Amino acid sequence: MSNAPLSQLSSNIDQSCIEIIDRLGEGSFGTVFRAKYKPTSLIVALKVIPNANDSETDKMMSEIDILARCDSPFIVDYIGCFVTPPGKKAGGSNGIAIDPECLCIIMEYCDRGSILDFIENAGGMHSYAEGEEVIRAVCASIVLGLEYLHGVANVCHRDIKAGNV
């Protein structure tokens, strides 16, 4: 992967096409927002990574490359990316602003969240009340996603956990 700074990243989305709706949470690399992709009115997840050092930039560019290559119903869809311009904040009409020089990755929005969200919303690990058929379907989907990543995309997912599924 290249050591190119964020300013040299090839963006394929104009940030004016994104309208931020609300903040969903924070991850290891940045903040995730629910947003609307204006050209299609599609609700999307917007992952915002603040001005990162070279090793973090390499990781993000690697993630973008992997997501862009994947085409499976068991892998979240990559829509595009952009870098916010230097010197001024970007934002929506609701007052949420994105700092300058942030890498923004636009992905499919999963409205039910992760498996961790699903378990926590049900009251925790020992309160989970879904039937065996639901658990079987979820497990099968995870296996099919991993099979796709390993076999077709030639990617080894090294961070499989409830919050990432």
Image (tube, rainbow, N blue to C red):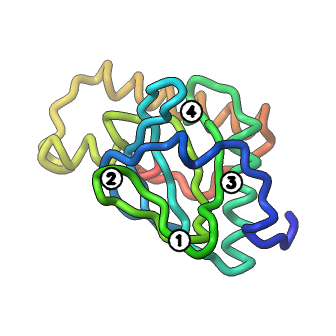
- Label 2 sits on a secondary structure element that is strand
Q: Amino acid at mark 1?
A: Lys
**What x and y, as percent, mark residue 108?**
51, 35
Q: Which residue is mark 3?
A: 63
- Circle 1 sits in a helix, a strand or a loop, which is it? loop
How packed mark 3 is, by other alpha carbons closer than 10 Å (few <14, some 14-19, many 20 or more), is some
Q: CA distance from mark 2 to mark 4?
A: 26 Å
Which marked residue is nearer to the observer: mark 4 or mark 3? 3
Rounded to the nearest whole Å, what is the CA distance between mark 4 and mark 3?
20 Å
Q: CA distance from mark 1 to mark 4?
A: 43 Å
Q: Residue at x 24, y 44 (%)?
A: 119
- Where 41 sits versus 21, above or below? above
Left or right placement of residue 138 versus residue 119 in this view: right
Closer to us: mark 2 or mark 4? 2
Question: Nearer the viewer's eye, disc 3 or disc 1?
Answer: 1
- For the residues marked 3 and 1, what is the alpha-carbon distance in whole angstroms? 26 Å
Q: Earlier in the sequence, mark 1 or mark 4?
A: 1
> Which x, y percent locates residue 38?
48, 32
Q: Nearer the viewer, residue 75 or 82?
A: 82
Residue 76, position in %: x, y? 55, 36
Split into 4 quadrants, where in the image is the N terminus? bottom right
**Label 2 vs 3, first from the N-terminus:** 2
Amino acid type, residue under disc 4 in the picture: Val
Residue that carries the numbered disc 4 in the rendered image: 143
Sequence-wise, the earlier of marks 1 and 2 is 2
Judged left or right of residue 12, residue 114 is left
The residue where tag 1 is placed is 88
Quadrant of the rendered image containing residue 100: bottom right
